Amino acid sequence: MDTPFNITSVGFIDLLPDAICIVDETGRFVFVSSAFERIFGYPPHEVIGKPMINLVHPDDRANTLAIADDIMTGNPRINIENRYIRKDGEIAHIMWSARWSPENKVRIAVARDITNRKKAETVRSALYAISEAAHVAEDLQDLFERMHGIISTLLPAENFSIALHDAEQQSLNFAYHVDQHQQSSAVLQQSAEKLYAEIVSTHQPVLVCTNDRLTLPPRLQTVGNQHALCWLAVPLLAKNGTIGALFLRSYNDGSHYTEQDKELLRFVSVQIATAVERTQLYARLQHASQYDPLTDLPNRGLLFDRLRTSLARARRRQEMMAVLFLDLDRFKEVNDTLGHAAGDQLLQEVARRLKQCVRETDTVARIGGDEFVILIESMQQPDYASIVADKIHATLGQPLQLDEHVVHILSSIGIAHYPNDGESEQSLLDHADAAMYEQKQQRKKDTHFGEG
């Protein structure tokens, strides 16, 4: 299409790093300078006569058209930012200024490519967000959800997984997994393990796409399936080695990941690995402060927290609840005759059996030595605590094998009901403790220890 007016010094215009664009009143290009191809990927002859709006990112089209209409009323606009889709499918961030030429019935615009600046700003924001997430995330799952959201600001992440390496089991476990085609992590496990082996050996991210599969090493040519277009795997490198990996997938109807995406994700993955390690360490420290190291049952501090919460809930809902105080009879004899290792083994088995006797909503805690407390919440029957106590007696009464020795466990259990036997944490525990001691004193049957 011929330009409807003379453009002077076109040779000088083509030397400008910014693109000069002229659009007629119907919104079609009538002229673009040479820089247009460098910025957008299209040579001038491919866009002349075509609607400008077709190049604008779909999410920005409505706003761009509104601004164009305003310019055509005689209001010049300076430093407007929006996104365009390049010929290669990549997004270009553009800052442009434009005015309307009423005598020529065209919009004249200058477009500057600010994609690199925008990417740098986005990466800085992402790094800050990752650091913040590491401090505010409640647990690993919360952290992974936050990481997914942050990665989504950098590149398409509709199909995103985080896998952590279990050093003890020597296995790769998906800790977080989202897939738009509902493919389970189990279906993707084999491909993930191949990619993980590659990034562990190279300490570098790996990009596998179907269109260049034959150029890959044979060990990677079978990665993916008929739906996958690209796999992007990035190691989570920590001080002591690789702790896991990030996996992104695109499908035939999705984005095509690039080498630039790989480098971008490699850069931020270092901060993500640090955030994961910090959250894992915090979780371990928190667990150690709340759980008994031998039995992995809640300790006294966590028991009081849960008892306090349970009491508040029982008052609010006017529900019944109970506390059982349990002590093993003649536990000292096991330590004295069979050794402390056998005593520890006995306590671990008791903990396991006690958890089998209660609901998941109840709490079994070890508060010291051979003393255990069971917190029973939301009781529907007044005698439910007694039923649980009978079940515990029966379960603990089953013989226990400790190496070559068979041990018969006997226990004393005291019960305190809320609100009849107390309305505070300590009063309920004191009542249950006193009831347990009374039962122990009255017990005439001795605990029998026999050899197997």
Image (tube, rainbow, N blue to C red):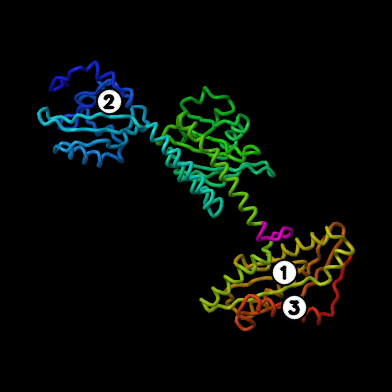
> Which contiguous range is marked in magenta?
288-296
Single out the residue that lies furthest toward the left. Answer: 103
Residue at position x 82%, y 62% in the image: 343
Task: Give the CA distance from mark 1 to mark 3.
Answer: 11 Å
Label 1: element kind: strand
In this rendering, the label closer to the viewer, 1 or 2: 2
Q: What residue type is labelled 2?
A: Ala
**Viewer-nearest residue: 167 or 230:** 167
Q: Which amino acid does label 1 sit on?
A: Phe
Work out whether 391 lies above or below 191: below
Single out the residue that lies furthest toward the bottom. Answer: 420
**Viewer-nearest residue: 168 or 405:** 168
Q: In the image, residue 416 lies at what x, y percent?
A: 66, 79
- The first of marks 2 and 3 along the sequence is 2
Task: Give the CA distance from mark 2 to mark 3.
Answer: 86 Å
Mark 3 closeness class: few <14, some 14–19, many ≥20 residues within 10 Å: many
The C terminus lies in quadrant = bottom right
Residue beneath disc 3 = 436
Q: What residue type is labelled 3?
A: Met
Q: In the image, residue 224 lies at what x, y percent?
A: 52, 34
Residue at position x 17%, y 21% in the image: 1
Mark 2 closeness class: few <14, some 14–19, many ≥20 residues within 10 Å: many
Single out the residue that lies furthest toward the top. Answer: 11
Q: Which of the labelled discs sits on residue 19, or is there none?
A: 2
In this rendering, the label closer to the viewer, 2 or 3: 2
Quadrant of residue 332 within the rendered picture: bottom right
Q: In the image, residue 397 lies at what x, y percent?
A: 78, 70
Residue beneath disc 1 = 372
Label 2: element kind: strand
Q: Which of the labelled discs sits on residue 357, or is there none?
A: none
Task: Give the CA distance from mark 1 to mark 2.
Answer: 77 Å
